Image (cartoon, helix red, strand yellow):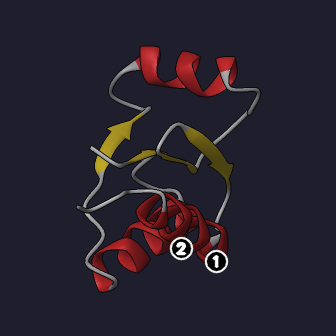
Amino acid sequence: MKVIVYSRPHCLECNVLKRFLNDYKIPYEERDCSKNPAYLEEVKKMGFLGVPVTVVHGRAIEGLQPDAILAALEKQDKNVNVD
């Protein structure tokens, strides 16, 4: 999985972020911090206090930052060598 989204159900930014990912057809794994407290601990270990946090190829992006997500995906895709 390239993209992981840490979120909560009633988080406006989280819902907008997931809509953005769906609109751009970017597959992602959703980790609902309200259902699994271990996910919130993962967010805290990354240095963040809340959600949304999007992890793209191991790089954590805090909040609603579509441009940063697209840039991280594009950079990773350019690093893939196809022979």
Q: Residue at x 34, y 83 (%)?
A: 24
The residue at 56%/16% (across/down) is 41
Q: Is residue 41 above or below residue 6?
A: above
Residue type at tag 2: Leu
User: Dot 1 lies on which element?
Assistant: helix
Q: Judging from the image, what secondary structure is the residue with disc 2 in?
A: helix
| Front one among 77 and 56 | 77
Q: Which quarter shows the N terminus?
A: top left
- Looking at the image, which residue is at 39% across and 52% down? 9
Horizontally, residue 46 falls left or right of residue 33, namely: right
- How far apart in space, not on screen, are marks 1 and 2 (Cα)? 5 Å
Residue under pointer 2: 70
Q: Position of residue 5 (x, y in %)?
A: 43, 48
Observer-nearest of 38 and 83: 83
> Could you say where residue 2 lies in the image, as x and y percent from the top left?
34, 49
Residue 43 rendering spot, x and y as whole percentages: 60, 28
In the image, which disc is placed on residue 67? 1
Q: In the image shown, does 17 or 56 lie closer to the viewer?
A: 56
Residue 32, above or below 73 = above
